[in-house]
Amino acid sequence: MIDDETTSKDRFFQQLAELSDAMIAAHGKDFSMGALVLAARFIAEREARAQAGAEAEGTPSTAHAGSA
């Protein structure tokens, strides 16, 4: 039996596939890949900034890498 988390993740992957297809159709494969890479970089940097800010304040960070 598929659990709720797996179903949710599958829905997000479907949405990413549909978004990628739309971006490719509108602007090409390079744009689509670049946009997705930039999104991943934004997520990674946001977590790093949150951790650095928490360390500067002397409090533990609530950002968890690899929580997927």
Image: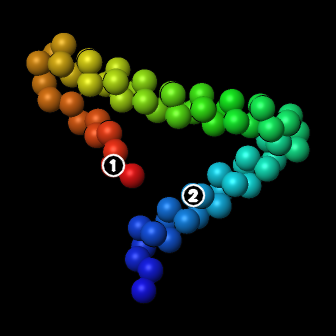
Whole-angstrom CA distance, mark 1 to mark 2, is: 15 Å
Check the image and report above or below for 13 versus 62.
below
At 39% from the left edge and 52% from the top edge, which residue is drawn?
68
At 77% from the left edge and 31% from the top edge, which residue is drawn?
31
- Foreground: 48 or 29? 29
Give SS at disc 1: loop
Give SS at disc 2: helix
At 28% from the left edge and 40% from the top edge, which residue is drawn?
64
Q: Position of residue 52 (x, y in %)?
A: 26, 18
Q: Quadrant of residue 30?
A: top right
Check the image and report above or below for 53 versus 8.
above
Q: Position of residue 39 (x, y in %)?
A: 57, 33
Kindly identify which residue carries mark 1.
67
Task: Give the numbered dot on residue 47.
Answer: none
Name the outermost residue toward the bottom.
Answer: 1
Give amino acid for label 1: Ser
Task: Tell me whether circle 1 and circle 2 mark residues in contact (CB < 8 Å).
Answer: no
Q: Quadrant of residue 36?
A: top right
Instruction: Give the left or right position of residue 21, taking residue 39 as reference.
Output: right
Name the outermost residue toward the top.
Answer: 56
Q: Residues within 10 Å of mark 2 (few under 14, many from 20)?
A: few
Say how the picture is coloured.
rainbow
Task: Give the numbered dot on residue 12.
Answer: 2
- Foreground: 27 or 8? 27
Give amino acid for label 2: Phe
At 85% from the left edge and 36% from the top edge, which residue is drawn?
28
Q: How many marks?
A: 2
Q: Position of residue 33 (x, y in %)?
A: 70, 36
First in sequence: mark 1 vs mark 2: 2
